[in-house]
Amino acid sequence: MSITDNLLKYKNELDLAGVKLVAVSKNHPADAALQAYNAGQRIFGENLVQEMVEKQAQLPKDIEWHLIGHLQTNKVKYIAPFVKLIESVDSIKLLKEIDKQAAKNNRVIDCLLQIYIADEDTKFGLGYDEAIELLRSEEFAALKNIRIVGLMGIATNTASELQTKAEFQELKVLFDGIKLSFFRKEDSFKEISMGMSADYKLAIAEGSTMVRIGSSIFGKRVIKHWKED
């Protein structure tokens, strides 16, 4: 099946469920993303800042770019002029840098707090207590150019549907608690980004508003190997 066919299969299903599709175009060329764009897709996710910057320069300007990978503070300045949503905020230090760079660009940048829900050491994210502590802090209260619009989580890479479901349920419970405690009056706090190609149906059943799907749309990734000069 073509990129267009793959995309429309997911898009039609997710539109009916009222869930946003983030097409993960990492490690795929800009023309692959353009095929998805021409089929109606407008939200694209990238893991690497350099790749996102290169594609943003080549592709239509009404694309909503989501940074979904681990973000280093020294790279924020490159995406601050255009990024729509940073899904992977995992520290107050990073949030302060996003706020600083957003101010320089006269913008308010939307962010999700990435919560550590997986039983894997390789995943990033805030612990539940850390997320609450961040939101209660004076440092957070001082930030004027960021807006927290929800939470993101990546489930354990496991064949156990029970474990995956439990992790998604925990994130939804945390989201509900944070909404009530910190964002009760803010309609913008509404996103739960969880679910990928293998587990998106489970994620939607547990309350996901946004799923990240890549290889099932674009095919196998082409990994670039950078040579040192």
Image (cartoon, rainbow, N blue to C red):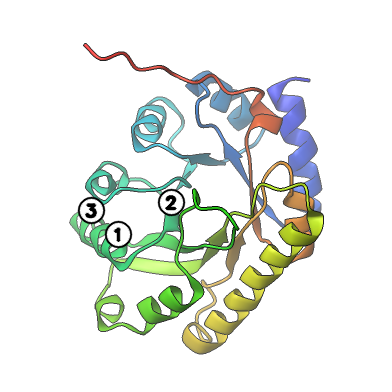
Residue in the picture at 58% in, 23% down: 221
Q: Position of residue 124 (x, y in %)?
A: 46, 54
Residue in the picture at 75% in, 66% down: 206
Mark 2 → mark 3, Cα distance in angstroms: 13 Å
The answer, for residue 18, to whether it is visible in the render is no
Residue in the picture at 25% in, 77% down: 139
The answer, for residue 182, to whether it is visible in the render is yes
Q: Nearer the viewer, mark 2 or mark 1?
A: 1
Which label is found at residue 105? 3
Q: Residues within 10 Å of mark 1 (few under 14, many from 20)?
A: some
Q: Disc 1 or 3, which lies upstream in sequence? A: 1
Quarter of the picture holding the C terminus:
top left
Q: Are circles 2 and 3 on residues that touch, CB within 8 Å?
A: no
- Seen in the image, is 107 located left or right of residue 127? left
- Seen in the image, is 223 located left or right of residue 144? right
Q: Which residue is mark 1?
A: 94
